[in-house]
Structures are given as structure tokens and as C-alpha cells.
Amino acid sequence: MKKILFSLLLCVPFLCANAQGVFVGNDQAVNVTLGVGRGVPLQASYEMCIMDNLFGDEHCSLGVGAYLGWTHYTERYAGIRHHNNSYRFGVQSTIHYNFVKNLDTYAGLMLGYKGRRESWKGYSLLHSYASFDFVVGARYYFDKNWAVVGEFGAEHAFFRAGIAYKF
């Protein structure tokens, strides 16, 4: 077991040595994802690279952008149907690191606004508040511009998966 672990650790520098930055320079990306949560949360985000070679590391970069999310779901309480529409929008900042070729991993913070409208039997209630959250994700580029994306975090949907386009 020790030999296998040692062999894997020896391979990591060679994998990283071949890694090319996939979110650098003037790169911009758009993600469209579906989430796991109540209903089927839909989220879109835009991000642009504002600094590469972050911390003097050619594999590290900083991105900023915006996001917008929405979901609808229906629940029953005491035999009464409650309809819920939830939305959120805001800004995000992420630090990207490229461990291996074509894989863009990132972690960051999101600051925004969340609202939810509940309605039942002719009544309606609106909740809204500022939201602060985190995101951890990865984009795997199967083409120069197209990637599959997976993200964890954000209260709108704990896990999201979808597609990304870089331009």
C-alpha cells in the first residue's frame, strides 16, 4: 500500500507540470447549470479573469462575475398546496487553480440578494434578504471553448451540474 501511495505522489508533479492554465488572460466564461434541491434549481453565471499568475503561480488566477438563480416547487402543508418561487442574484469572486490539463478547479465567495414568494389559498408572502455564500467547482474542457461543470455550495442548490462556454 505504501508503494502504491508513494508512486501516485511521484506522478502528481508530472501531471501538474503539463497543466496549462485554462482560465487566464482575458478569458470569460458562462455557466448554465441545473441543481439538486427543492424543485429543479436553474442557475446561470458569468465570470471573467481579472488576474492570472496569482501569487506568482502560473496555474493560479482570479475571476469575478455575476450569477442569477431561480427555482419553483410546490409543497403540501396540512392538505393545503403551497407554491414557492425562489430567486437569487449577485456577484462572485473565485480563485482558480489548474492541477491537470483541461481541468479548471475553483473556489470562491458569493454576495447577493435572495427572494422567495410563497402563495396559498389566495394569500401571498414575500421573503427577501442579503445572502453570503461559497462555491467550490470544476470545469472540464472537452473542447477549446466547451466544458462540463459541477459546483457545490450556495443555498439555492447544494449541487449543480451543467455546461460552460469560454470566450
Image: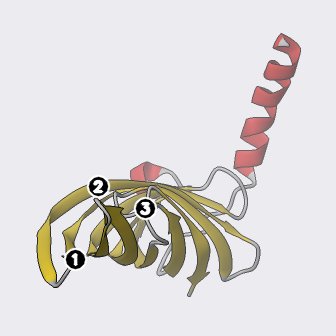
User: Within the image, what quadrant is residue 76 found in?
Assistant: bottom left
Q: Which residue is mark 2?
A: 133
Between marks 3 and 2, how big is the CA–CA gap? 11 Å
Label 3 Cα crowd, 10 Å radius (few <14 / some 14-19 / many 20+)? many
Label 1 Cα crowd, 10 Å radius (few <14 / some 14-19 / many 20+)? some
Q: Nearer the viewer, mark 1 or mark 3?
A: 1
Callout 1, which amino acid? Trp
Using the image as rendered, state which of residue 23 and residue 158 is in the foreground.
Answer: 158
Q: Secondary structure at mark 2?
A: strand
Between marks 1 and 3, how big is the CA–CA gap? 23 Å
As displayed, is residue 71 above or below residue 79?
Answer: below
Residue at 78% of width from left, 42% of height from top?
14
Q: Is residue 70 left or right of residue 105?
A: left
Residue 9 image label = none
Callout 3, which amino acid? Ala
Residue at 22% of width from left, 57% of height from top?
132
Q: Secondary structure at mark 3?
A: loop
Between discs 2 and 1, the one toward the N terminus: 1
Label 2 Cα crowd, 10 Å radius (few <14 / some 14-19 / many 20+)? some
Callout 2, which amino acid? Asp
Q: Which residue is mark 1?
A: 120
Q: Nearer the viewer, mark 3 or mark 2?
A: 3
Position of residue 152 measured from the top left corner of the image (x, y, whole percent): 48, 54
Q: Which residue is mark 3?
A: 157
Q: Is residue 93 left or right of residue 141?
A: left
Q: Secondary structure at mark 1?
A: strand
